[in-house]
Amino acid sequence: MFKKILVANRGEIAMRIIRACRELNIATAAIYSEGDPTGIYVKKADEAYLVGPGPVRGFLDSQQIVDLAVRIGADAIHPGYGFLSENAEFAELCQASGITFIGPSPHAITLMGSKVKAREIAEIAGVPIVPGTDGAITDMKDALAFAKKAGYPVMIKASAGGGGRGLRVVRSDAELRENMETASREAEASFGDGSVFIEKYIERPHHIEFQILADRHGHIIHLGERDCSVQRRHQKLIEIAPSLILTPKLREEMGNAAIAIARAVRYDNAGTVEFLLDQEGRFYFIEMNPRLQVEHTITEQITAIDIVRNQISIAAGKPLDIQQKDVIMLGHAIQCRINAEDPKNNFIPCTGTVTAYLSPGGIGVRIDGAVYKDYTVPPYYDALLAKLTVRGRTWEEAVSRMRRSLEEYVLRGVKTTIPFMEAIMEEPDFMAGRFDTSYLDTHPALYTYHEFQQPEDLVLAISAAIAAYEGL
């Protein structure tokens, strides 16, 4: 097993990796930038090193990170998600420097990092794919011809990356002409690759993903599925496991399809195979994420399998000690992303200093976070502050536990998604399991939630009024 792992990330995912390493008795080294020197993960790691320049560049500087790992005697690097986690050149640089990259091979990252190549591999493996263009497309005539053949709506998608960037749904020739170049520019700015392709847009599907674990000895299993349909701007907000609509037969078919795709690229380590499930129960492969996912927590809660611990073990060359028959899903789990965003203002990111913080607890409640009282939320990174995950024996118990946990959650000083999530947990369709990717668009009343005034807010308001009065 490794002696020291450099964690090439920040925030809650850095904390998650550090915790797994602590349980394995592996020393950890964190990296931080001048934009976030007070992150709690910096304090929890055994060592911490400043990278730069600036608040972001150091997290993306492959050479600087690998050189640091060599200098401090780290024998492995865990990239988390985001930043360099899907960068094949970074993985190759690690290998060339004698550092183990905790993730899939550069070969698998390259193949799965391109949605166009991934579609081709899925098709060869016999897995259904959404009808789309044959590879990247640049000619507007070809784009219009495909749209006419497939029928509107269609979706313009960046070949590289994810997170909803470089993605546009269009419903007419005029919208297609207007958005092709825009999507390409956004993809270029986000991923350094402006290539896009077009596929048929599936109306109101469920977004279903399967968690994969694969070792370097040819063993591949899946840990069941997650339903990630509650999204805004194609970015996930709430995830649940298992899906409320999959039958055992469909779960087996989709799980086998996920494993077939992983096997086709000789995949190893943790990964996620993503599908769309239409209203008629047909599923289509859309992409594979060759990394750890934000929402891995809900899979861990219903299977009791530590995905990060397995990532480390697989990277060290050990075989999986779990077989498919050992994977048993018990109960239901929900994850809410606690983002520093204002849902009433188009989810605009918010910054500020956390004036009060108290996380919920009790049976079946898990917090993965990196926020505390007096922490200043920086403007340079993703808005995710924490992930609140709950588990219940039944779906109804999980929803009621999440509702109670959100009510307990105190995070003041910056606007967050907490009150919005509370509104969702009380909405009848969500409580009944009636939701798909159109859920937020078709439930505009959710955005009229009331932001309850907390006792500490009232004290601050009274104090401010007294100070203003005495200053007259």
Image: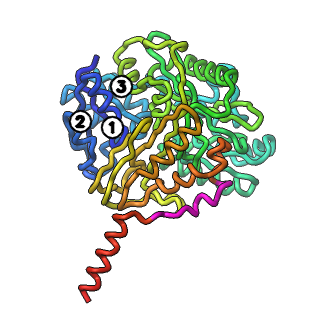
Res 331 quadrant in image: top right
Q: Amino acid at mark 1?
A: Ala
- Residue 436 in view of the camera: no
447 drawn magenta:
yes
Spatial CA distance of label 2 from label 3 is 19 Å
Q: Which residues are magenta?
A: 441-452
Res 230 quadrant in image: top right
Colour mapping used in the image: rainbow
Depth check, mark 2 against mark 3: the one in front is 2
Residue wearing tag 3: 101
Instruction: Classify 10 Å Cα crowding around label 2: few (below 14), some (14-19), many (20 and above).
Output: many
Residue 244, x across and y down, in percent: 64, 34
The residue that appears at 67% across and 29% down in the rendered structure is 246
SS assignment at label 1: helix
User: Looking at this view, is 465 or 202 the one in front?
Assistant: 465
The residue that appears at 37% across and 55% down in the rendered structure is 411
Spatial CA distance of label 2 from label 1 is 9 Å
* Mark number displayed over residue 14: 1
The residue that appears at 55% across and 13% down in the rendered structure is 325
Spatial CA distance of label 3 from label 1 is 15 Å
Residue wearing tag 2: 45
- Residue 210 in view of the camera: yes
The N terminus is located in which quarter? top left
